Image: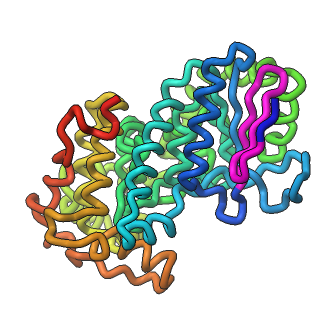
Amino acid sequence: MNTTIPEVQTAVVSGVGFITLNRPRALNALSLSMIRALWGTLCAWRDDPAVLAVAIRGASKAALPGSEDVLLGDFCAGGDIRFFYQAALAGDSALDDFFTEEYRLDYLIHTYPKLYIAFMDGVVMGGGMGISQGARLRIVTERTRMAMPETGIGLFPDVGGGYFLSRCPGHVGAYLALTGEVISGAQALACGLADVCLPASELPRLWAALQTQGMAAVLPYLNTMEKIAYSARFTGLSGYFDTNVLAAFSLESVPAIVAALQVQDSPSARATLATLRQRSPLMLHVVLEQLRRARHMALVDVLRMERDMVWHCFYPRHLGRSAAASEVVEGIRALAIDKDGQPRWNPVYLEEVTVAMVAPFFISPWDAAQHPLAV
């Protein structure tokens, strides 16, 4: 069976369902139509005994229209932030649909009963992490550029980010969540955010082998994953990160983290401070609280909490602001609309953020029975 959807291409061969995100000029960023196509496909395959496993990749800009060549590209750069901006300003209800349906899709992937394999080559950020972190086999390469960069646009690491980042070893999850730092495939392995790191040149061959051999093509990786993961843990975070910097992110408040980094006064500490100063001060405080809560929550509860949080991000009524004056609309404006790189954060300084500004992000705007993710 072959089905082609403009931005999502699917096929079933040798008992494996193949998905290609086909929006390469946008680094395969997710649109609402893509989320709906993925949901429909995965639900159908979940109940189809002829499908034993699922593999997902991103299309390459180099692929020719209509070509059957296997050319892997950037996996997925996240959600379509230009759509977020336009929908927020227009009061378009599709914005709410996007996040509700995206989080449902992420939960489906995390709980999928069949082997789900993510080819996480190139850019893997934001929503791309949402559709890959629940995979049973997460493959990265030397080309992988992974991040949850949401604090840079006045948002927070959603799509279950509170869940998987809070469970990273040491304090690297808080570091990645607050800074939005981009990490390599090898670093992702050490952080527990990937299972296998392969040369990018191997991925087309593995994709093709899945089409001829079915699940047998990945059995060697599945059988050695625990050994690979142990090796990465043995190497430890110290091989890839400044552990003194990471230790600062164990502290209980953002001002305390900043103070600890200032005392260190090392090149990496200064670079981290410079990054934090570019992020939304308000959202840095919100994200640290998000991780603290998520650490002790089940995935389904984390996703519900994050759905509440994203509502407050786009409808910051407790701050007396409209959507147009929200941190996220301002952050997207500076990054992708005007591209001036100068977001006007409010508050401007970390010290101006109060508990009264942060706490309402964690109050649901819905009764439990009416929550968009209640079912």
Residue 257, image quadrant: bottom left
Q: Magenta stretch containing residue 182, yes or no?
A: no
Residue 374 visible here: yes
Spot occupied by residue 87 in the image (x, y as percentages of width and height): 42, 66
Quadrant in the picture for the C terminus: top left
Q: Is residue 291 left or right of residue 121?
A: left
Spot occupied by residue 282 in the image (x, y as percentages of width and height): 23, 65
Spot occupied by residue 56 in the image (x, y as percentages of width and height): 69, 38
Relative to residue 269, is residue 43 depicted above or below?
A: above
Quadrant in the picture for the N terminus: top right
Q: Residue at x 37, y 62 (%)?
A: 151
Residue 220, image quadrant: top right
Q: How many marks?
A: 0
Q: Residue at x 23, y 39 (%)?
A: 293
Question: Of residues 313 and 350, which is closer to you in this image?
Answer: 313
Q: Is residue 148 left or right of residue 186?
A: left
Provide the residue span drawn in magenta. Answer: 4-22
Q: Residue at x 68, y 21 (%)?
A: 222
Question: Of residues 234 and 37, which is closer to you in this image?
Answer: 37
Q: Is residue 298 left or right of residue 69?
A: left
Q: Is residue 134 left or right of residue 95?
A: right
Relative to residue 82, is residue 307 depicted above or below?
A: above
Relative to residue 334, is residue 78 depicted above or below?
A: above
Spot occupied by residue 113 in the image (x, y as percentages of width and height): 56, 18
Q: Magenta stretch containing residue 8, yes or no?
A: yes
- How is the rendered protein coloured? rainbow
Residue 271, image quadrant: bottom left
Question: Of residues 339 and 175, which is closer to you in this image?
Answer: 339
Question: Of residues 222 and 3, which is closer to you in this image?
Answer: 3
Residue situated furthest top in the rendering:
49
Residue 142 visible here: no
Dominant secondary structure (helix, strand or loop) of the stretch shown in magenta:
strand
